[in-house]
Image (tube, rainbow, N blue to C red):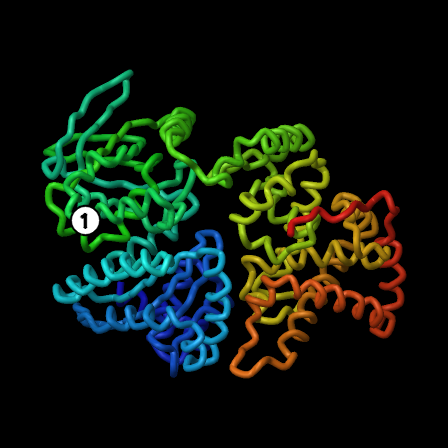
């Protein structure tokens, strides 16, 4: 792995943007494992003078997790405990963000502003020590100690933190899974001698049920990156809920041998199961009930490795039929409480939306469940995801794109406001189309000349772009307090061949608003954070002002008067084409 990475980082992108192999290694990891794009990667790197043992910070809104990355790119075979102590040092400093901002470098200060904001939304912190070497035994002992200390600190500070060492083998596994992320297939072999298993055939199905040692559980691939749970109806809900806290407490307590009796068990399915020579070979493995438990057990990995006579009930079923696998996933999860956002796929309003959308667009598909994919026969232009629709609605109809990044808020706090009414399928598809056209301008080619810091926020800033499109119509019609129907806007824009022009105006205005905010004087010891600006409601006034300025300056541009005249015709809507904003705050 070391040799491959060493060769990969010779590419111009790594050589031109990062001054040394240490930074290039971290950048390689962000690109190839966290799947950050080139601009996001540059923005995430904080390594350098006064980096305070923090080489990179990745804020993953989808996973509600802050990844603190420390890299050690070495050709030697072993790594001692010093890098682990550096990671622990970074955690001690993170607990005092004000002080850390005062002494950190500029890039770290800006990232810490964003960290501070997302911690208010109860994001978890995951420390990752990535290394091409292998820990010495002393370092492994330190890792076990640090995991326990973080668990104790998490209980006291009410901030969930975990630490993981990503060594050469784990980097290889994550790299390979990232390459196959569209449809990863996990194979794993269980040594039956380590546990107590009964293998039977029930209802024509091969079944293996037994007690698997906890320390064997953490060897199953695909836990941390979620690929093991593709067919689960929900992904990890984090380590902060009461059940997962209880699991961690049991692992670290003197009652760990009773784990088997305290836990309901884990259910896994596979495409094919083979029993031979005292092993159970599982092909196409997926856990359909146990995501929370396995993630929690993994967070205590070093302690778990030391536990003897500590087991968990495991059920393995050979289920190659997809529809049957789906039913098993749903039924095995029905016994435990699920957060509201994880049950929205079965809400009658969502099911009605799906029905109406697919009736209106026979070539389309409305995705309601996490991990679900549209059939290959469907037109991708008419494939709409429930999660995306929620983000579109709050950006366009509630005029709060600064909340679009938070799926938790949309499907917990604001779900009733967003989905309480009948919503026309043509408006849903119009939002889908506007967003698809917007994303075309957020490519590496950067046709609109957007600021690089804006491009680094591709995970959520395009929703501000969508908001700006709606405001172009609202401002042009003097309807600042009301919101146009998306389908009416799209119909006029398509009819006049002005979709690209409106998206350009909206994007340029968003860019102007960001640059204006960045140039405003900051309080002493404060650094302007584009990420915090984009997530604050105050950014909306800046975007609106930039749109008005663009409209007023358009006649002064070359060919601007002709564009202005065409634009006026396109943007003109009737009063009945508007409605009042949907309240979301």
For this rendering, which residue is in front, 4 or 336? 336
- Looking at the image, which residue sits at the far top? 203
Where residue 381 appears, as percent x and y from the top left, is 63, 43
Q: Is 415 drawn above or below residue 539 in the view shown?
A: above
Rendered residue at 27%/58% (across/down): 152
The image quadrant of residue 14 is bottom left
Rendered residue at 17%/66% (across/down): 139
Residue 33 visible in image: no
Q: Is residue 277 left or right of residue 406?
A: left
Rendered residue at 18%/31% (across/down): 210
| Within-10-Å neighbours for mark 1: few <14, some 14–19, many 20+ | few
Q: Which residue is mark 1?
A: 253
How many marks overall? Answer: 1
Where residue 305 appears, as percent x and y from the top left, is 16, 51
The image quadrant of residue 454 is bottom right
Where residue 92 appears, as percent x and y from the top left, is 32, 70
């Amino acid at each position: 792995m070391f040799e491959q990475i060493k060769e990969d980082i010779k590419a111009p992108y790594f050589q031109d943007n990062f001054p040394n192999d240490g930074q290039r290694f971290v950048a390689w990891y962000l690109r190839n494992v966290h799947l950050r794009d080139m601009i996001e990667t540059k923005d995430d790197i904080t390594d350098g003078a006064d980096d305070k043992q923090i080489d990179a910070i990745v804020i993953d809104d989808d996973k509600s997790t802050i990844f603190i990355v420390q890299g050690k790119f070495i050709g030697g075979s072993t790594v001692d405990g010093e890098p682990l102590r550096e990671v622990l040092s970074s955690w001690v400093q993170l607990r005092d963000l004000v002080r850390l901002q005062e002494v950190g470098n500029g890039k770290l200060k800006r990232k810490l502003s964003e960290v501070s904001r997302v911690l208010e939304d109860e994001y978890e912190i995951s420390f990752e020590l990535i290394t091409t070497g292998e820990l010495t035994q002393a370092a492994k002992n330190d890792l076990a100690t640090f995991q326990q200390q973080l668990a104790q600190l998490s209980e006291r500070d009410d901030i969930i933190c975990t630490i993981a060492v990503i060594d050469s083998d784990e980097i290889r596994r994550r790299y390979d899974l990232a390459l196959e992320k569209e449809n990863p297939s996990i194979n794993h072999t269980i040594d039956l001698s380590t546990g107590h298993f009964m293998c039977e055939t029930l209802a024509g199905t091969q079944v293996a049920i037994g007690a698997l040692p906890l320390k064997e559980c953490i060897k199953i691939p695909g836990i941390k990156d979620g690929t093991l749970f593709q067919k689960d109806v929900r992904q990890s809900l984090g380590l902060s809920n009461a059940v997962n806290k209880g699991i961690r407490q049991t692992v670290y307590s003197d009652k760990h041998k009773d784990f088997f009796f305290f836990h309901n068990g884990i259910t896994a399915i596979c495409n094919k199961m083979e029993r031979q020579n005292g092993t159970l070979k599982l092909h196409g493995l997926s856990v359909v009930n146990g995501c929370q438990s396995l993630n929690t057990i993994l967070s205590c990995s070093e302690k778990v490795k030391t536990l003897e006579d500590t087991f968990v009930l495991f059920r393995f079923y050979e289920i190659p039929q997809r529809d049957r696998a789906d039913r098993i996933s749903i039924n095995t999860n029905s016994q435990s409480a699920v957060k509201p956002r994880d049950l929205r796929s079965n809400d009658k309003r969502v099911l009605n939306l799906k029905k109406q959308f697919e009736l209106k667009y026979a070539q389309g598909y409305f995705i309601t469940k996490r991990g679900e994919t549209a059939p290959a026969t469907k037109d991708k232009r008419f494939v709409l995801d429930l999660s995306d629709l929620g983000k579109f609605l709050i950006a366009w109809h509630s005029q709060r794109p600064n909340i679009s990044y938070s799926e938790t808020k949309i499907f917990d706090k604001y779900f009733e406001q967003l989905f309480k009414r009948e919503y026309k399928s043509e408006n849903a598809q119009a939002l889908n189309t506007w967003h698809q056209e917007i994303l075309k301008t957020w490519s590496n080619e950067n046709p609109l000349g957007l600021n690089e810091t804006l491009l680094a926020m591709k995970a959520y800033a395009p929703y501000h772009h969508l908001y700006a499109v709606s405001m172009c119509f609202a401002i042009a019609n003097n309807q600042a307090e009301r919101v146009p129907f998306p389908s009416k806007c799209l119909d006029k824009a398509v009819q006049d061949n002005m979709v690209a022009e409106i998206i350009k105006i909206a994007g340029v205005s968003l860019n102007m608003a960001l640059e204006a905010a960045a140039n405003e004087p900051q309080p002493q010891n404060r650094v302007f954070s584009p990420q915090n600006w984009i997530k604050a409601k105050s950014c909306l006034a800046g975007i609106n002002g930039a749109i008005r300025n663009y409209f007023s300056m358009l006649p002064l541009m070359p060919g601007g008067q002709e564009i202005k005249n065409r634009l006026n015709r396109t943007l003109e809507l009737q009063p009945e084409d508007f409605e009042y904003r949907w309240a979301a705050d």
